[in-house]
Image: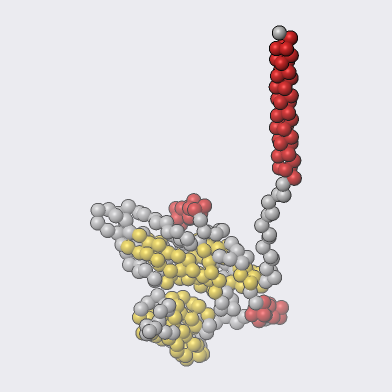
Amino acid sequence: MRLTTRITALIAVCSICSALVLSQEKASKKDKKTEQSQTATPATPAPPRPALAFGLAEDTPVRLKLTRTMSSKDAKADERVDFEVLEDIKVGDVIVVEHGAMAIATVTEAHPKRTMGRAGKLNINIDYVQLVDGEKVTLRAVKGGSGGTHTAAMTGAMVATGILFFPAAPFFLFMHGKDITIPKGTEVSAYVAADTPLDPTKFNKQVAAAESGTPKPEASATTMSAVVIKSTPDGAEIIIDSKLVGTTPSTVQLTPGEHTIVIDKAGFKSWQRTISVTAGGVINLEATLEKLP
């Protein structure tokens, strides 16, 4: 009897000791985990983008105005669309994009209204804007990179202006049973697509003129001449004296003197002519573009 009692007491003591050891081990492991979580190295933040010495920062806004009415009724895929810059864009005190400069977009899809009340479709992709030095800077329709987070912003832009850009995935604007018409003068904002370093030496003439205080002479309307420029196929870029002025067909006003005109379209050879302009005249130019082999 005594032996049985002693054995029972011994088993009880062993059980108590085992429970204490297990609880201490659990507490020790918990403490170690807590210590590891407290001493864990925090995630390294992404390094900041280096500042541009001279250039246009990503997401710099560019206010634009459509220079002609666009409609799904007669628009064609790959057709170039002209926009005019509404205000100067400066880097410091230097104008790098002038008020009145051209920006170019491209029609990516266009269908007139169809039967059974199906609406027309018109998709336009904003491409680039021309700088004072003649170079081009890529644009996009919304701030930031590509992705679904831009859906709301793009939808708001479509509702507000009736114009549709898509920098990444296409979003379609439907008007039930109607063609989509975007009137001339519609204003939109585009944004510089990426940090773009610029060469300040290409803008030195502008800086020197500003410092000299010499006003730039302006030609009067009576001394200007109209030049009507067409091409086959149309929708080609018109570059006059190294400056983009629009797309074909267009009528431009030029000052008297010699001017070099280049007609450019992707997939075709460049067409170039030098013309002599006299005051108050009208010149018609038609370029037939030859396909590249």
Residue drawn at point x = 58 percent, y = 66 percent: 194
Which quarter of the image is occupied by the C terminus?
bottom left
Give coordinates of residue 228: x percent, y percent: 40, 81
User: How many marks do you count on the picture?
Assistant: 0
Q: Does residue 219 appear in this view? A: yes
Residue 239 lies left or right of residue 10; in this view the side is left
Please name whichever residue, 57 or 181, is drawn nearer the observer in this view of the structure: 57
The one of 144 and 25 positioned closer to us in this rendering:
25
Q: Quadrant of residue 216?
A: bottom right
Residue 289: percent from left, percent from top: 38, 83
Would residue 164 be found to the left or right of residue 44 on screen? left
Query: In the current view of this chain or complex, which residue is farthest to the left?
Result: 115
Residue located 49% across and 87% down the image: 260
Q: Left or right of 181: which side holds 49?
A: right
Q: Where on the picture, by quarter, is residue 108?
A: bottom left
Residue at the spot x=71%, y=78% of the render?
211
x and y percentages locating residue 113 in the rendered image: 30, 59
Dividing the picture into quadrants, the one containing residue 236 is bottom left
Give the quarter of the figure containing the N terminus: top right
Q: Is residue 251 shown to the viewer in this render?
A: no
Residue at position x 61%, y 67% from top? 195
Judging from the image, the colouring scheme is secondary structure
Of residues 165 and 221, the one drawn nearer to the viewer in this rendering: 165
* Residue 196 pos. (x, y %): 61, 70
